[in-house]
Image (cartoon, coloured by chain):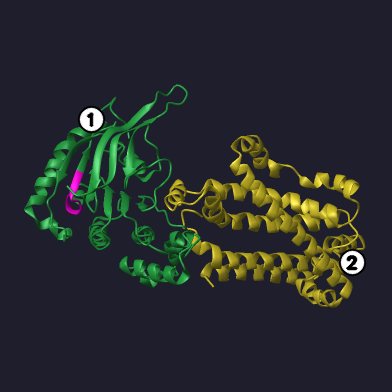
Amino acid sequence: MRQPHAVLEGVTRVYPGTGDRPPLRALGPIDLTLAHGEFFAVVGPSGCGKSTLLELVAGLQTPTDGRVVFEGTPVRGQVPDGVGVVFQQDASFPWATVHDNVAFGLRQRGTPAVEVARRVQSALSLMGLAGFASAYPAQLSGGMRQRMCIARTLVLEPRLILLDEPFGALDQQTRLLMGDELLKLWRTTGATVLLITHALDEAAVLADRIGVMSARPGRLLDVIETHWPKDRDSRLLERPELAGITARLWAHLRRESMAALAPGGATP
Amino acid sequence: MSRAGWIRLGAIGALVAAVEALCRAGIVSPLRLLPPSAMVLGLGPLLTSATMLAQVARTLADVGIALALAVMVGFVVGAVLSALPRVRAVVEPLLVSYYAVPVFVFYPFFIVVLGLNRYPRIAIGFLLAVVAMIVSTLNGFDRVPPVLLKTARVLRLSRVETVRRVILPHAVLYVSTGLKLAVAYAFIGVIAAEFIMSGDGIGYEIAFAFNNFDNRTLYPLILLVLLVSSSLTLALHAWERRYVARQTTQEAR
């Protein structure tokens, strides 16, 4: 196995109870090691704590038990340098142009203007937004806004990219193409990717390894290796092995999703 | 202009023409109402009279001061209230029911305290306008989506930077709604206060002409107030369409 990049050790998240509501165990314990430069996808039934897992790795939440280690340093209370996050919801800043949205993080770091212009330009062309630099987010489609948010993450050259159902709001064709874009980015940047998704085929095509989570409290039931070549794209949909992977994912998820939906079971 | 726009313009034109016809035919006495054409002609002498222009300038200045104060104070109070949820819980019901209070009942009190000068009028204009600003500012702060605050943390912004670079710019998008209301309220407050009791301003001139049965001054003055306030509102709309609307999504408006 390659060098570990991010490590989760017995990570557990319990939301404290309020008033007469008992504490809620949302997640864990989870042990997981993400290798440098790997593409790891997480699938699981709704409400199993997938997004909580991502926020714990990002440092947006703090584990109740256990710890997250990124590049050898424990993550505590703030997002470490080198981690980029793309959310499912539209996270564009509506008052700023596409260019200023993407430049935001670089300017925040005090990057020289010439360098900002160059890097924003290249991130925008990579995401197919070169002609929209002076547009405002409200003038873009949902898919373009999400591409802009990916460009905003990318431009900071994160070493670990966390994506929380980034294509959840997009139609099937757009998400396949966006998946291809994501694979291209992953190959060119060499970053480690953690992708949360509810789409089994998306996980099966994109990832090197896929973690399957149980119904709440979410734990890792299985980790499936896909053995795809690094130079891959959505044309993998033609490959017969894909059915085997999605079938194995579904075998786990069917049981867990039914458990999650059952009366008295975990609620989303 | 859209079809609806032309129809609207036509309807207004027809109404004015009807009033003109009624006046010309002697059905409405000129002692009651001046024909619209005479109102327009009456604007000429008003706008060339230095004393009248000074009154207009005085009123506009008072409206401007009331408005500027309302915008600044309203934004700051809105921002502070949104940061202090407990205080807000106490104050918010008062804000919501505020416009049920006829602020003008306090006018005599302001005259007693501040004197018979411009300040009681500015106070009335300010009091009418400020709450619209507070409410729209609160609304702007309330509607900052949680995902933007998470993004701020991912971009490693400090607390102060988050307020300055994410929360404030988002709130400002909503301020234009309060600003439009505040302009209207400041106008109403100042001119009505001049009308009720004062020694200068357009409202005073209207009251003076009214008390002296001077229709030839009264109606052109009313027309003048209409022209000034509607052109200001139109300018504000144009500004909003150009700079604000493109930044707010349909859902946010």
Chain A is which colour?
Answer: green
Q: Does A167 sit above or below residue B208? A: above
- Which chain is disc 1 placed on? A
Q: Amino acid at mark 2?
A: Asp
Q: Residue at x 23, y 34 (%)?
A: A214
Chain B is which colour?
Answer: yellow
Residue A259: image tag: 1
Reading the image, the residue beneath label 2 is B214
- Which element type, helix, strand or loop, lies under badge 2? loop
Q: Position of residue B41 (x, y in %)?
A: 80, 77
Say left or right for B122 vs A259: right
- Which element type, helix, strand or loop, lies under badge 1? helix
Query: What stretch of residues is rendered in magenta?
Result: A204-210
Residue A208: say if magenta: yes
Q: Residue at x 35, y 50 (%)?
A: A88
Name the foreground residue: B32 vs B203: B203
Say left or right for B9 vs A75: right
Residue A161: say if magenta: no
Q: Position of residue A151 (x, y in %)?
A: 36, 61
Crowding near the residue tagged with mark 1, few <14, some 14–19, many ≥20 C-alpha atoms within 10 Å: some
Name the foreground residue: A171 vs B81: B81
Say left or right for B101 vs A55: right
Q: Amino acid at mark 1?
A: Ala
Name the foreground residue: A80 vs A60: A80
How far apart are the alpha carbons under marks 2 and 1? Answer: 84 Å
Residue A1, can we see it? yes
Name the foreground residue: B67 vs A54: A54
> Same chain for the residues at labels 2 and 1, yes or no?
no
Residue B114: image tag: none
- Which chain is disc 2 placed on? B
Residue A44, can we see it? no
